[in-house]
Each structure stands twice: as structure tokens, then as C-alpha cells.
Amino acid sequence: SVNIENLNTLSGLHPKPENVKFTYGTAGFRMKAELLDSVVFRTGILAALRSKKLDGKVIGCMITASHNPAQDNGVKLVDPMGEMLEGSWEAHVTALSNAETNEQLVDIIHSMVSSLKIDLTKPAKVVFGRDTRPSGEALAAAFVDGLKVLDAETTDYGIVTTPQLHYITRCLNTAGTPEAYGEPSAEGYYKKLAGAFKTLVDGKTKLSPLTLDCANGVGAPKFQEFVPFLGDSISVNIMNDDVENASKLNLNSGADYVKSNQRAPVGLKMVPQQRYASFDGDADRIVYYYQDDDSTFKLLDGDKIAGLAAMFIIDLVKAAGIDSISVGVVQTAYANGASTQYLRNTLNVPVSCVPTGVKHLHHEATKYDVGVYFEANGHGTVLFSPSALKTIHSAEGSSPAQAVAIRNLRAFSDVINQTVGDAFSDLLFVETILTQRQWTPKIWDQAYTDLPNRLVKVVVQDRSIFKTVDAERKLVEPAGLQDAIDAIVLKFRDGRSFVRPSGTEDVVRVYAEAATRPETDELAFRIAGLVF
Ligand code: NG1
Ligand code: ZN
């Protein structure tokens, strides 16, 4: 059983703050960094338990608060194949984090051990990394103390992007198997992605340079590290790369800022028709943008990236002569209505809508041979099923053109991080498609025209009274509210609006879209008025 004396000593170093209730949500634990010490310590205990439960498989842990301000931090666990922690364990880690005394902590551990049949004699292996936040180092030390409670073996990967940590976790667990995913190191990651990218752009005319806003986060030093591996296959001008000055992290920059404000990050003077992209603070999200000749700002968000990827893959499987492979796209209700129309009616691909949160999108995407999933905010990736990969790797093609398409499909599956949305990998696959087609951002943008849309936050007394169904598109509670929403939406051309409680902030979100900007604003205003 657990060495209680050891646990008491270690736990004493990481006391729980009083009167705080913690919840492991869609983004793990995330809050002001000064509240996190005990939470991260206990997350270490849980990670070790999870590894023991999975017979010593490696569990990953990432210490980051993504696009949140510098004073925040967070912690998130990664399951063996690089996916998010299994849903049912979120309740266990929440319970551990809220134990008020050491006795309660021990009780919860013992009841997990018995109800989940965890064999404590099994080994535990846990790896971890963190972003550039100053609070990260001390939190990593708290995590290591948590691992000591159960004598877990551990490796500290230091400062890495969130997707690198997911990649490394999967590599460690698949090493030596037919599913081997790559070398478990940042260098192995760079080599794999760069190698695939070079194959994909080989012999094509290089595009003009891409300007890349790194939100003054971990993406900056890590992309710098990546550049030598890419050689002269791409040129990228990195900006907002000041990670020494912690207060600048995500400040008026990054994917979340650009998407929410529909404007360029601080310090960027845009030139018409050039390509720009922004990462978020832990480099798992990306959005593109450009300026049109009339100076308007044009956003190429997660929906636009999904459309581009789906279009390209459909063409590629046709060209390869293996169009038995089915392609599908997964979105949330926040996807622009015009993107859904484009996917369904122009590309003729099936589109599923799931609740907000990457784990829902990821899960749904595994149902297709090739599943493209993106949140509008720029988090997403493309999943190739094991059988699709087998088909792609065994196909030979009956013409030189087919052979080239097959080679491209293989490289495309390697350039894409299959574990989680990854800004580096998404950047490379967008650059691949634009290079292969010799497309400007404007040509990419012409696939469809976004409906004007508006996302507003409404602060309410108790957001837990809002209950949704149908992938969060309909409210069932409070009673009558949905009917009132429907009655208003009906009056707007191309009108669509829905209301849901945020999973990460204490607000209710109202989304609206309609045929024109003034109608959209009016619709959003009227629906927000109903909620308030
Ligand atoms: P909530 O706060 O539940 O709306 C937000 C984003 C999600 C996702 C999560 C996790 C929107 C509208 N919502 O969720 O897409 O990224 O944070 O970070 O962008
Ligand atoms: Zn992020």
C-alpha cells in the first residue's frame, strides 16, 4: 500500500489553500499560478496511479495555461497514445485536488486503488514538460514531489510545446512496436516533421516568406530550434518572440487575440496579400490571416484550415486511385455556417458537429478513415485510421502520377501530428498545400465567404442553470428560453444563434451569425438580452 509517512511529509510541503474548489475541466486545471502548487503535486500522484493502472505505460503531463495571461498557469495529463486523459479520470483527479486533509487524501487514493483495481506493485512512468511561464519551474518541482509518493520513474523534458509533449508520450509508448511513432525527443519530432515537409514541397517553387507571431510564448524558441531542420524548404520571419519578458506572454498577440479581435497582433504592420500566422502561448493553435488590397483584415481560422485540408486530401486520395478511403470533417457549433455549407455542398464530405472541447472532436474524428477536426479558434489536426494508413502504405499505384500522389499522402500523414492539434504541424501542412497549388492566401480564402459572426460573453449569476443538448446547439434549461431564441432567430436572414455555458470561464457565451454585419450584431444583442 501507500507509504503514509512519505505521503504526509511530501504533502505537508504542498498544502491546499483553504476555501478553493478545483475542477479538472476541458483544459485540465487552469487558474492563477499561486493557487496551483497543491493541485500540481496531487496531479503527480494521480499520474503515477494512472500509469500503474495501465501496467507501467508512460503518462505525460504538461504545465501550461495556453493563451491565458502570464500570471496564470495550468496542468493537463496526457494518456499513452498522446490523447487527453480519459474522461472518467477527470473526476478522480478533481477529488484528489479537493481533499482538505492528508487523511482524506489517503482515503481517496485507497478507494481509487480498490475500486479501479490498481496494482501498486506495478511500475509507474511519467514524463513532463512546461511552457515558458516563470511559475512553471516551481510547479514542475511540485509535480515531481507528487510522483515521489508512488516512486514513479520520470523524465523532465523541460521547456516544450504542448504538442511536443503529446508526441513524446506517444513515441515512448509505441517504441519497438509496429505503431512506432518516432524518436521520443524534440529533435526526433523536428526530424520527422521536417523530413515529411521536404518531401511534400520538393521541386516546387518556394512561396514568399511567412510572418509568424509567436505570442511571446514557447512557440518562439521552439520554432527557432526547428528552423535548421527545415533548411531552405521554407522561409519564416518570427515575431513576438520575447520570452524573457514574461508579462508580454499572449499580450495583444497570438492566435486567441487575433481570432477574437479580428485584427493583427501588436507590432505587425501588414502588407497586402502577404501571409501571416499566429500561434497561441503553448503552440497548439494557429490561425492565418492577410490584408486585402482595400486594407480589410481577412482571417483564415480553424474552419478555413479544415476546409483547405479536406479539399486537398480528397483530391489526393482520388489522384492516388484509393478513393475507397472516406474523408470526414468534425466541427463544433462555433464553426461558421458558410464553412459547413462549403464542406457539405461543395466538397460533399460528411460533417459532424460535437460539443466544445478537443476530446470530443478527436473522438468523433476517429470514426472516419481520414478525420479532419478543427475548432474555429484554430485548434485541430487530421487523424488517419490504422486501416487508412495500411492502405496508403501498401498502395503502389498503376501510373507515375498515382505513385506521386501515394508518396504525398504518406508524407502528409507524417507531417501531421496525430496526437493533438499542433501549430507547427498545422503550419507545415497549410504551407504544403499552398506551395503545391501555388496559392496566395486570397485564393485559399475564396473557397467560401464567412458569414458575419459575433461571440459575446454574458456574466450571469449562475451559469450552471444553462443546460444544452444537440452538441450544445439547443438549450433545454432554463425552460422556455430556447423557444424565445428560436422566435428571434427566425426573423434574421441566414440567422443562427446559440447559447451555452463556458467550460473554462465563469460566463455564458452567445454566438450569432446572419447575412450582414448589422443584422448579426442586432441578433447577438437581442439574444444576449434574453440571457442576461
Ligand atoms: P469554453 O470556455 O468552454 O467556451 C474555450 C473555447 C474552446 C476550447 C476551450 C479549451 C471557444 C468559443 N471556446 O471553451 O474552443 O478551446 O476553451 O481551451 O473558443
Ligand atoms: Zn493552447
Image (cartoon, rainbow, N blue to C red):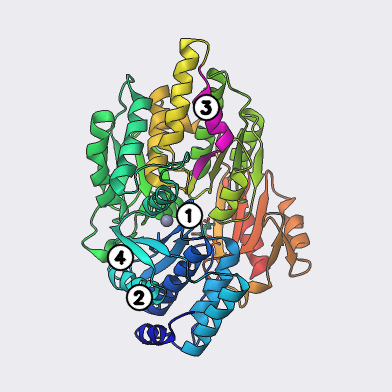
Residue tagged 3: 392
The numbered mark at residue 145 is 2
Instruction: Identify the magenta region.
Output: 381-396
Residue displayed at 54% across by 53% down: 358
- N-terminal of the pair, mark 2 or mark 4, is 4
Image position of 424 (left or right of 332): left
Q: From where the camera sits, is residue 361 visible? A: yes
Q: Mark 4: which amino acid?
A: Arg
Between disc 1 and disc 2, whose residue precedes? 1
Judge: label 4 CB < 8 Å from ligand 2.
Answer: no
The residue type indicated by label 1 comes to: Pro
Answer few, some or many: residues within 10 Å of disc 1's Cα (few below 14, many 20 plus, some between 14 and 19).
Answer: many
Sequence-wise, the earlier of marks 3 and 2 is 2
Which of the two discs, 3 and 4, sits closer to the camera? 3
Residue type of the residue flagged with mark 2? Asp
State left or right for residue 459 relative to residue 258.
right
Residue at the spot of label 4: 133
**Could you tell me the amino acid type at mark 3?**
Ile
Q: Are marks 1 and 2 in contact (CB under 8 Å)?
A: no
- Left or right of 4 in this view: 313: right
Identify the disc placed on residue 80: 1
Q: Nearer the viewer, residue 51 or 412?
A: 51
Cα separation, mark 3 vs mark 2, equals 45 Å
- Please provide percent x and percent y for residue 394: 52, 24
